[in-house]
Image (cartoon, rainbow, N blue to C red):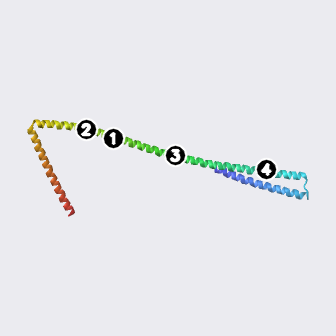
């Protein structure tokens, strides 16, 4: 496009120079006609001189009109090119925004799928815990019925629980004393 614009500008300058030369030739013809006849030029010479001036005026007018049309065409093409560039930029921006929206939508779908998976795992865990609770409740009720049948076994279990509590209290006391001594040592 820029090479054709340069070609048009070069040709326009060349035509303007040729029109300028033609104007000079017409002026020289008018001077020659005025100087040749020493007074009043004859009708044929005047007619020929007028005809050449009309031709020059027609060429000049046609050149100006063509130049204005081409300039208007170039301006329109520049404007349309600018509009096309703006539309393409907008479409590119829209495509980019659309891609971002699609990517965000995919992230949302993945998050939704992940949340569904986590909920599924939580429900499975709940069901497992409920079944374990049922099993433990059954074991506890069987153990209770066995201890009720055998009172000696019940007293043995109570003594084991008492010793277990006592051992837990002793262990907790030892750990507490060790922690206190370590704190005193660390701060002291």
Instruction: In the rendered structure, find residue 94 and report the number of the disc placed on it.
Output: 3
Name the one closer to the observer, 32 or 163.
163
Instruction: In the rendered structure, find residue 130 and report the number of the disc placed on it.
Output: 2
Question: What SS does tag 4 mark?
Answer: helix
Q: Residues within 10 Å of mark 4 (few under 14, many from 20)?
A: few
Q: Earlier in the sequence, mark 1 or mark 4?
A: 4
Q: Residues within 10 Å of mark 1 (few under 14, many from 20)?
A: few
Name the one closer to the observer, 74 or 20.
74
Residue 59: image x %, image y %?
A: 77, 50
**Mark 2 → mark 1, Cα distance in angstroms:** 16 Å
Residue at image mark 4: 58
Q: Are marks 2 and 1 in contact (CB under 8 Å)?
A: no
Looking at the rendering, in which quadrant would you find the C terminus?
Answer: bottom left
Give above or below for 174 relative to 148. Answer: below
**Mark 3 → mark 1, Cα distance in angstroms:** 37 Å
Q: Earlier in the sequence, mark 3 or mark 4?
A: 4
Q: Quadrant of residue 24?
A: bottom right
Q: Earlier in the sequence, mark 3 or mark 1?
A: 3
Q: Earlier in the sequence, mark 2 or mark 1?
A: 1
Q: Residues within 10 Å of mark 3 (few under 14, many from 20)?
A: few
Q: Earlier in the sequence, mark 4 or mark 2?
A: 4
Question: What SS does tag 3 mark?
Answer: helix
**Mark 2 → mark 3, Cα distance in angstroms:** 53 Å
**Mark 1 → mark 4, Cα distance in angstroms:** 89 Å
**Mark 3 → mark 4, Cα distance in angstroms:** 52 Å
Q: How many marks?
A: 4
Residue 146: image x %, image y %?
A: 13, 36
* Residue sitting at x 84%, y 50%: 51
* Residue sitting at x 20%, y 60%: 183
Question: What SS does tag 1 mark?
Answer: helix
Residue at image mark 1: 119
């Amino acid at each position: 496009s820029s090479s054709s614009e340069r070609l048009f500008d070069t040709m326009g300058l060349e035509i303007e120079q040729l029109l300028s030369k033609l104007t000079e030739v017409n002026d020289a013809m008018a001077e020659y006609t005025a100087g040749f006849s020493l007074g009043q030029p004859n009708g044929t010479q005047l007619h020929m001189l007028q005809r050449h001036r009309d031709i020059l005026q027609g060429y000049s007018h046609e050149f100006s009109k063509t130049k204005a049309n081409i300039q208007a065409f170039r301006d329109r093409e520049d404007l349309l090119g600018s509009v096309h560039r703006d539309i393409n930029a907008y479409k590119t921006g829209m495509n980019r925004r659309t891609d971002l929206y699609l990517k965000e939508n995919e992230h949302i779908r993945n998050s939704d799928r992940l949340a569904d998976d986590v909920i599924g795992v939580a429900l499975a865990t709940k069901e497992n815990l409920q079944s374990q609770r049922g099993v433990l409740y059954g074991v506890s009720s069987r153990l209770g019925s066995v201890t009720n049948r055998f009172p000696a076994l019940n007293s043995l279990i109570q003594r084991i629980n008492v010793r277990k509590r006592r051992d837990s209290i002793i262990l907790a006391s030892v750990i507490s004393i060790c922690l206190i001594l370590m704190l005193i040592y660390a701060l002291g």
